[in-house]
Image (cartoon, helix red, strand yellow):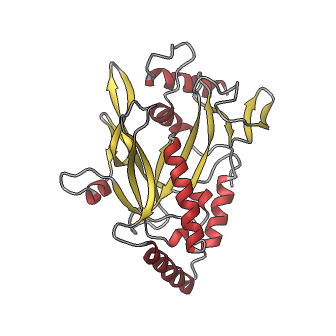
Amino acid sequence: MIKGLAITPPTIGRISIGRMVEQNGNRLPQKDDQFTITTQIQGKDGWLIHPVDAELREQGKKLRTIPVRLLFNDPALNLRADYTFFDRKTGRPVCIGDGQQCRRLTNEGMESMPCPGPMQCEFGKGGLCKPYGRLNVRIGDDDETGTYIFRTTGFNSIRTLAARLQYFSAVSGNLLACMPLAMKLRGKSTTQSYRTPIYYADLTTREGMRLSEAIKEAHELEAQRQAIGFDQQALDDSAQQGFANAVYEDDEEDLVDIIEEYFNVLPKDDVKSKPVSVSKLKETLAASSKAS
């Protein structure tokens, strides 16, 4: 296995709460009140809609519930979340932490040091260090190891998804990969949001299904898998090794899109009020790659 290359779940699509819009030559993230499922291909108007989006979307209605299954039994493999600081000049991640320890790229290489979190960290102040979560889910049964990825920098989504994964794992007897679940969009408003709705992702049992019924189905599916020799523990172990093979799991070729959509990182000589320029980000990433 190539060292330094994270072996992540195969991704066949994206799930987002929002979209990118172009204004004055700049592409800006715009929040939405529904899920959108896209391919990994971009056209001139943004990410191309995945066929499964139309299959799940009822005529004239917004997509706010997606039936899903998980690939792994271990909650931490399905949802990876950390604090991430991106360099303003190159767009590369330079510090990744969990609130206790972080791995930071310095002139001497990658170093481990205490991580107080973005609110108390002098290095990450200014809003450039954010929570960053990645959830992989399965939609349908056409590709049983292919996943759709949901990326978020929202505390509400990360906290809610982490709690649900832990709870469903506990009550099912560590059978997360067999639970029939659904991603659901929820909304809330706070004083900080000026009473405007904030939308976040949640995990629940399928619509119309009680938790006891979902647990029963999970145990039945687990029995079927064991009968044919499906080794879920080996799959989890393999995934754990793959994630551990590199410090950062996202490919460098995807960083521009990730930064643009979720972090809005600016080149060093831009002012904070100026929106991110895609062309400038690509120039700085290209220059950085040549230099290294």
Q: Is 278 left, or right, of 162 in this rendering?
A: left
Whether residue 251 is visible, yes or no, is no
Q: Is 283 left, or right, of 126 in this rendering?
A: left
Closest to the observer, 62 or 191: 191
**Measured from the top left, where is residue 109 in percent x and y?**
78, 32
Task: Please report the residue visible at 36 percent of the width from the left and 58 percent of the height from the top.
Answer: 66
**Measured from the top left, where is residue 198 in percent x and y?**
40, 39
**Measured from the top left, where is residue 27 in percent x and y?**
38, 27
**Residue most extreme to the front:** 191
Task: Please report the residue visible at 55 percent of the width from the left and 60 percent of the height from the top.
Answer: 165
Quarter holding the N terminus?
bottom right
Exactly how many numbered labels are in the figure? 0
Quarter holding the C terminus?
top right
**Residue most extreme to the right:** 108
**Measured from the top left, where is residue 137 in percent x and y?**
47, 59
Closest to the observer, 147 or 179: 179
**Residue most extreme to the bottom:** 227
Task: Please report the residue visible at 56 percent of the width from the left and 56 percent of the height from the top.
Answer: 163
